[in-house]
Amino acid sequence: MQLQRIESKIYEVRGQKIMFDFDLAELYEVQTKNLNLAVKRNISRFPQDFMFQLTKTEWEGLRLQIETSKGRGGTRYLPYAFTEQGLAMLSGILNSDKAINVNIAIMRAFVFIRQYALTHKDLTDKLKELETKYNKQFHDVYEAINYLIKKDKLVTEQKERKRIGFKIKNNG
């Protein structure tokens, strides 16, 4: 299972890294309804810090990010969000070979994200410190970079454009 595919399905809600029930169902190759039924049959294994249901406001805020449809064809119920501990608990109630392999891949993705965040935390902290110290200068630098990027794109587009109109042949 591709690590990037799983990583793209990990979101941050309420300050926690989570995965939605519908994404998990897709990975496990089961219907979302069946995944949620298995969870509800074992609800004592899923306290609030393992799994929670999104509020309508949270869902509306995330819906555009994750490209779900509104109304028809979309979800009728607010999705459940599973934290890393909730995902580990899912492995105990979903006992197929597919579920075991998917859970291993998901755990690896969470570990990778955690390691990435830890190794880049120092750099991020330094950048934030510099940004607050030299806020005006950073803003100017960002504007200059954006200007140069846009300028380069325009030049590239103009070079690639096919010339039209009257053409003269050289009969040397």
Image (cartoon, rainbow, N blue to C red):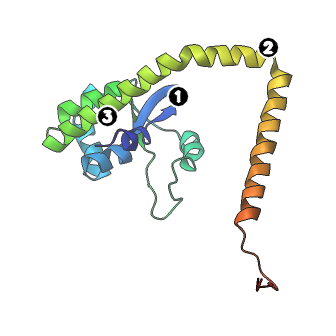
Q: Dividing the image into 4 quarters, which one contains the C terminus?
A: bottom right
Element assignment for label 1:
loop
Tag nearer the camera, 1 or 3: 3
Tag nearer the camera, 2 or 3: 2
Local crowd size for mark 3, using a 10 Å CA cut-off: few (<14), some (14–19), many (≥20) = many
Where is residue 76 drawn, in percent x and y? Answer: 44, 55
Where is residue 51 drawn, in percent x and y? Answer: 37, 31
Q: Dividing the image into 4 quarters, which one contains the N terminus?
A: top left
Local crowd size for mark 2, using a 10 Å CA cut-off: few (<14), some (14–19), many (≥20) = few
Q: Residue at x 44, y 54 (%)?
A: 75
- Whichever of callouts 2 and 3 sits on the residue coming sooner in the sequence is 3
**Residue located beneath label 1 in the image:** 14
Q: Is residue 147 above or below residue 18?
A: below
Dots 1, 3 in contact, CB < 8 A: no
> Marks 1 and 2, Cα distance to the nearest angstrom?
29 Å
* Snapshot quadrant of residue 81: top left
Where is residue 155 drawn, in percent x and y? Answer: 77, 56
Q: Inspect the image, locate mark 2, and give the three-letter code of the amino acid beneath it.
A: Lys
Q: Inspect the image, locate mark 1, and give the three-letter code of the amino acid beneath it.
A: Arg
Which of these two is toward me, 154 or 133? Answer: 154
**Residue located beneath label 2 in the image:** 133
Extreme front residue here? 172
Regarding residue 113, the answer to whether it shows in the image is yes
Local crowd size for mark 1, using a 10 Å CA cut-off: few (<14), some (14–19), many (≥20) = few
> Marks 1 and 3, Cα distance to the nearest angstrom?
20 Å
Which of these two is toward me, 79 or 116? Answer: 116
